[in-house]
Structure formats: C-alpha cells, structure tokens
Image (spheres, grey):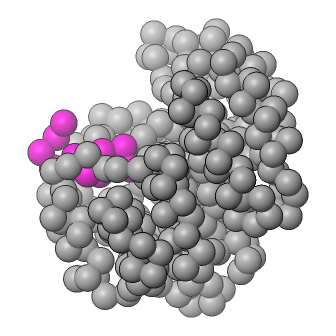
Amino acid sequence: MSTQVPRLLSGLVDDAAVFPPGNAALPDAVTAHRTHRAAWYADMVGPLLLPASEIQRGSLSGLVDPAEGLVIGLIGDTGLDQLPQALEALAPDGVTARQIEAPVAKRGEDPQPGLAELLALSDRLDAAVYAEIPLTFGLMGALDTLAEARAGGLPVAAKFRTGGLAAELFPTPVELAAVICACRDRKLPFKLTAGLHHAIRHRDPETGFNHHGFVNVLGATLAAVGGTEVDGVAELLAATDPVRVVEPARAHRDAERPLWVGYGSCSISEPLTDLIRLGLVNGGYEA
C-alpha cells in the first residue's frame, strides 16, 4: 500500500461517477477510473460502480479489453431477479463484480420479503452482497436477518442511504448513530451511499440540507467499535469542528478500518482534496 494513503482509508471511496449528481457518461467514467487506479491515491479508491441496466444493455462492449480485468461493483437497479443475468453479461468483457448492492424495499415497505429473495440468490452471485435497507419500518428486524445469514456463512452485509433529493433521505445524527451501533452490536459491516460529498458535516447553501461528513462517519464508527453508545456517536456525527472530527481518524490512521466498508461518490477528487487539506492523506494532488 502507498505510504501516502493510510491503511485506515484503504478502499474508502467507491467510484460512482455514472450516478447522480455526477452523471458521467460511461466511456468517460471507465477512462477516468483507469486513471484513478493508476494514480498515487489508488489505494483509497474502490471499484467502479455500474448499474445492472447498463450492463444488460451491453454498454461496456468495446470500452473494456477483456485482458484488462476490470473489477466493478454491480448496483441492482433492474430488480433482484435480474442480478444473475447482469453478472453473466459481464463475462464476455472479462469484467468481474467484487460486490453487488441492491435495494430490498422502498421506504415504508417491509424489507423482509426482498431480503429473503436476495439471501436466496446470494449463493449464486459469487460476490459480497450488500442489502440496501431503508431507515424506516422493519430496519432492526432486517439487520437481525442479515446478521444471522452472515453468521451462517453468507457474504452479506448492510447498506444505508444517507442523502438524496428530499430532506427525509438524510438521517439525523441520532438516527445514523443508532444504525451504526446496531451494526456494531450484530458484528455486521455496512456501506453508505448518497450525501457524503465532503469530509465534515455541513449545510448545503442551495438546498438547506445538512449533509453528513464522511470523516465524521469514520470517527463515529471508530468510537462505536470502541464501545461508545448512541449519544456519544451522535455527537461525533453532528460535530462541525474539523479538529474534533479529524483527531480520532488521525489516531487510528495505521489501523484497518472497522465495520464501515466505505461509500460511493460520484467524485473522487472532492473527498481526496478534503483529506489532503485535513492532513489525513499525504499527497500533492490538486483537484
């Protein structure tokens, strides 16, 4: 691993360039991902996230050399039953899916039926599987189901949405802290998606939405794993003082990141620039 990217930040940011709000064209996203994978900060970058709908349309054909061995994360936007077909469509281009992420319910729906369907498929998917669970009705029961399946040997974990186009898609610090602590109690890894555009918690001046900071989440997760309960974890998530937020990460920079697998970002340069400015990454990158 590069000495410029600490172990704590390894694979923190998946490349979600084709998703909103970036909406990069697929050829541009593939080219940019190659650049990221060859850069000095490559250790920070996870796989390129691609929707199943693009894969099933054959959109990668001609963009990837089969000898290249491109590794992606597959986002199940065409329904759980279509995941095996999407994986099969990757084979001719020599592409493999390291992880599969799929929603199991809409907000307010019971997540158990969709979760049961995804778990039944997981043996056929040959990849780490992340079930996206709404932070609403049935959340804790769904986490119990996932934890039981994981303890039984299935490579499954949780995924949660931390932002979007509506205020209700942004969990409060207390809500997110409760979820982090619930995953800790169940020894259940988790991923996050949406809203984590910058390192430190901030208010978007255009929308008025309060966005979680990804370094806040990192510090909060470290605290939770260390035994801090919901109130203390929520305080770290709510903090806007960079010094308070950065110090836990700095103290653990040489350790493996616990529990939180990472998150997808439509920009790699934004989180990287924030990390450099905060002194958590030793690089000379200019965005």
Q: Residue, x 23% and y 69% (percent of image)?
A: 248
Residue 229 visible, this orientation: yes
For residue 206, above or below residue 16 = below
Relative to 1, 133 lies left or right: right
Quarter of the image for residue 76 reads top right
Residue 41 visible, this orientation: no
Relative to 250, 271 lies left or right: right
For residue 268, above or below residue 200 = above
Q: Nearer the viewer, residue 113 or 210?
A: 113
Q: Which residues are magenta?
A: 1-12
Q: Position of residue 144 (x, y in %)?
A: 65, 48
Q: Nearer the viewer, residue 92 or 52?
A: 52
Q: Residue, x 30% and y 45% (percent of image)?
A: 10
Task: Give the position of the N terminus as an image quadrant.
Answer: top left
Quarter of the image for residue 96 reads top right
Q: Residue, x 53% and y 79% (percent of image)?
A: 173
Question: Magenta span has 140?
Answer: no
For residue 143, above or below residue 100 = below
Q: Nearer the viewer, residue 278 or 234?
A: 234
Q: Main secondary structure of the magenta part?
A: loop
Q: Residue, x 51% and y 71% (percent of image)?
A: 177
Relative to 244, 17 lies left or right: right
Q: Position of residue 20 (x, y in %)?
A: 66, 58
Q: Position of residue 54 (x, y in %)?
A: 73, 33
Q: Position of residue 131 (x, y in %)?
A: 67, 43
Question: Magenta span has 9?
Answer: yes
Task: Give the position of the C terminus as an image quadrant.
Answer: bottom left
Q: How many marks?
A: 0
